[in-house]
Structure formats: structure tokens, C-alpha cells
Amino acid sequence: KGRLKLCSRCIVFEPSDAGDSSSTRQRPLLKFLYKSMNTSVQEVSFSSSVSSVGPRLFSFVCTNYLEMMSGDKVGPYKLIEFTSSSGESSGEKRFVMSLLHSDLAQFLTTVNYLRANDDSNNHSTGRKNSILQSLIDSALRSSLQFNASHLVDFHEQLLLPCPMKVNRVGPLTCSPGGLMITNKRIYFQPSRINSTGSSMIGVQYFSLTQIQRIFKRRYLLRQTALEFLLTSTHRFLFVFDSTAERDSIYSVAESQIPDVVVTAATSRVLLDIMTQRWQRREVSNFEYLMYINYEADRSYNDLTQYPVFPHIIVDYKSKRLDLKNPATFRDLSKPIGALNPERMQYFKERYHSMTSSSAHDAHGEGIPPFLYGTHYSTPGYVLHYLVRVAPEYMLCLQNGKFDAPDRMFHSMLETWESCLCNPTDLKELIPEFFMGSGEFLCNSRELDLGFRQSTGERVNDVILPPWASSPRDFIRKHSKALESDWVSAHLHHWIDLIFGYKQRGPAAVAADNLFYYLTYEGAVAIDAVIESSQRNALETQIQEFGQTPKQLFSSPHPERMPDSLPSSKSAANTKLPKEVTVAAP
């Protein structure tokens, strides 16, 4: 027994013991790819001895399948292939299953629709995604009904005539469903696409009193999302079909909890106040960077817009970290790509060749010239750093495999040297490098990350610089470096590049800080793209290339006051937003 999940490219069978939190999972999850199925999924009939379940039986034939999480251990998916009678690996096997609750006819229609869509050679990836979205939208329209009997408190008042269609977004996940607001709570009801029985299975909710702040967010460079930050540090990111729908829900929330809703004008004022507090050293560099990341639409829920922090150290060889020596630190006035003059020359030559010719994308549209074809923050880069604590996400991104051992996050020194010299590596850091215990640097789950071809060395814990005795010691000293006098005196230059006036336009060109055009908000009007396959292709590109943060400052960012100067307290009594949590998710 277990649960069957329909996915866009496969069927996943989760055995019943896999969901039992009281015991270790023994039996693996089974993943059947549509492309490995030789026939459609069909209803089958058996003899009268099993006729009691006959109407719910179905079968399919496949040449192989994947095993995941066997023995509750995370690792690369295991491919199980079948051999033919002649011993060749081109055999096949029939699997028979029965549905206990779901309607078999509806299941067969849906799964064969998905299989045909995935198997079609006549459709582009964008077209396939468009067809899949049509199926999801159809299922949502038929299941968006909210049953008031599932309210926590029967005295709650529904504030919407029907649930609003949304997607709840998390790291590498996008769950369709409906959003309902009452005068006491917000409910998210997952769609019935992968549910059986009641549409309320898996319903999630949180109290309005738990909401610390509501952020208007962008998603795939469109202003269509809301993020709810709770007092418990949990975050819920919901994406709507349009800006108008997003804003209508925002207005309803504002009518119930006006104290946590911050308008654009107020947000600007609060940002200016926070900048002044940072200048006066009333908040740390870390706290300020987290604050402006939040204001610039960076979110732990969206790996394409994960909070970004700067590389600050260049010395990963010394036994002692000297925070008084300027040579210890990276030049924060330049983007990562411009730190190496030889590599920068390569980028500039390519840029000038683009300005003298007409580059076009796959749709024949002109591409504005750029210096860097890769970004400093992408889902792949984030998971590169976090693979030891979030291996499931890496396996999902890499189609069931870890990255090649020679490309894995192996050493702080090698990571820095790659960012300095490799023309395809421009990644900055993430907040985890400056907070917590450094758990992400340890292979505490004993993952099999492979052996490096260059040295034969096993990839295990991240190799730290000699000046760090442990991951915790590395985080402590690295955080101290972030708060050092040198970084405090130069951090405003990096803010100009990432969040400020040097982010785009002529100032970006002058600062050697120009990225591929689809990383910038407003570079393309996605809503105006009528052809669905082209629109899906653009969204896929935006996800893969990364996204430049929302521009917060249009003039040079002010410097921080030297530590020797007394702090001004003139704005100490100014009302500030509720504390923005900076803890890791």
C-alpha cells in the first residue's frame, strides 16, 4: 500500500512506510518516467476471485524505473533496468496497481494526457509546459470550492466569495491551490490534482495575529506575488495570475491587519531610516544586508531570488586571519567578474563584438549586449553551497544525480579561485556563510558525493582555510570580517552594484556590471507575450539565468560612519517596522 503521485513527467509511488515518521523508511520510492513506458496506462480486468477490486485495477509496461530514498538514505536515484530473455538490457515489465479512493476513469484520462504530452516530439519544452498549465488550470477551476465546515472557528467570516487561485512557491516547488481569507485566518487549500477524497486534505492555515509583515513580491520578474512573514519565522509565498489579483488580496489583508501592511511610500521612508541607522552603526552590516535583501524581493522561498551576500575575504591560505590588513579583503567596488583584469578583458572583447553585430535569441529578437552571460545568484549556485543540508533539492535540480565531484563545493580556497578566474563562475555568497553553526559545511548525513578525478580525493566536509579550526569557528571569524572596519568603510560600493544605481544603465556599463538582459525586471513584457510556448520559454530562461534584485537606490549609497565617531540618536524614537527576522529558514 502507499500513495501514487502524478507528476508532469512521471508517476511516483510512495510506500506506506515511507510516510511513517515513527520509523525509518525501508522501502524506496519508485519513480516511473513516462518516456520509459512502452504502452499507455490501461484498465485491466482479472478473474472473479479478485473481482472486488477489478474495476480499480490498472497497469502499464515500462523498460526501467528509478528507486529513491532506499533505507531512508538520500543519494543519487538508482536506475533499475529489465533484461530480456536473451539477456539484453532492453527488456520490459508490467506493473499492476489498484486505486482505493480515486476515480479510475479520471485517473487514466489524466495520466495518459500527461504521458502523451511528455512523449511528443512535435512540441517544444515551452509548448509542453503550456499544455501542462492548461491541465492544472482546468483541475483548479473544478476544485476551487471552500467548505466552511473545515474552518478552525465556526464564527469566522469568509472575506472572499470563493478561493483565489494561487501557487504556493517554495524551493523548487510550485503547488497550485486556492487562497481564502477570513477575519481571523488565511487558508491555503491545495488543488485536488494529486489528492484523494476530501479537497481539504493538506489544508494549511495561519492566524492573522501571527503575521509580522506582508511583502509585495515579484515572481519571474512579474509583480504577482505576496509573501507573509510570520512571528514564528515561517514564510508563505503565494503567486497570483495577475498583479490585479495580487493587489486585491493585499487590500483585503490590509483591511484586517493594517499594522503589518506597508505601502510603497512607507516602505521607502522605512528603508531610508534603516539606512541612517546603519550609517550610525545602530544595526550591523549583516542586519542591514538582510533588510535590503527583503526589500529587494529576495526570499528564502524562491531559489531564483535567494538572499545574496558578498565575497569579502581573499585570504584562504594564512594560518591567521588579519582583519587589520587591507590585503585580506576583496575589492568591494568591483563586481566579481571585474576583479581579474585578464578575465575582464575577455568579457569586454565579447561585449564589444556584440555591439558591432546583431545578436538574436531563439525567437529572432535582438539581444542587448552584455558582459556576463551568467549571474551571481542562481538556483544552481544556492544549492551548490547547500548540497550537504539540502541534497534532495540538488537531486531534483540535477535529474536524480549530484553534480560531478570535481564541480562540487569542496574547498573555500578553490571556490574563491574559481570565482576569480573561471569565466562561467561569478557567484557571490549566501547568508549562511555569516550565521549559524556552519552546518552546511559538514557532510553530517554521510552523503556519497563521489571522488574527484583530479586528486582521487573523496568529497566530504568542505575544506576550510587554515585560519578556521572548525565550521563554527569559520562562521564566527567570517562574520567578524563582515563587521570589520574595512568592510564597513567599503560595503556601500557593493550595495551600489547589487541594489543601487550601478545596477543597470550607463552606470552599470561604466562599472563593468552588465548582465544578460533577462535578469532585469522590465527587460521584457512577459504579460504581453501572447504565444504560450514563447512565454514559457522566457520564464524558463529567467529561472535559469537568475534575477537581479529590485533596484532600491538611484544615487550613490551613503558611507557608514567610522566607529570612532559618536552615533547620532536624532531618529532613535522614529517608528520602525516590526523586527525583520534574519534567521535561516
Image: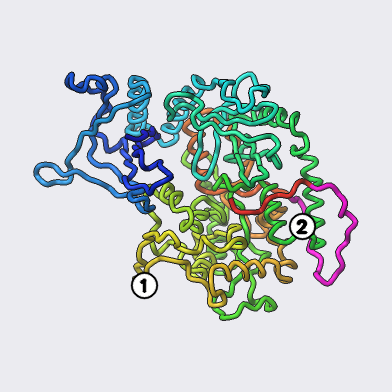
Give, as a single range, the part of the protein colored magenta. 553-576
* Residue 307 appears left or right of 409: right
Q: Amino acid at mark 2?
A: His
Q: Which mark is residue 557?
A: 2
Q: Relative to 245, is 273 above or below?
A: below
| The quarter of the displayed image where residue 39 is located | top left
Q: Which residue is mark 1?
A: 455
Q: Secondary structure at mark 1?
A: loop
Q: Relative to 517, is 319 above or below?
A: below
Percent x, y for residue 363?
48, 37
Percent x, y for residue 341?
58, 69
Residue pictured at 25% horizontal, 42% vertical:
64
Q: Relative to 265, is 581 above or below?
A: below
Q: How many numbered marks appear? A: 2
Q: Amino acid at mark 1?
A: Thr
| The quarter of the displayed image where residue 566 is located | bottom right
Residue 314 vs residue 527, the one in the foreground: 314
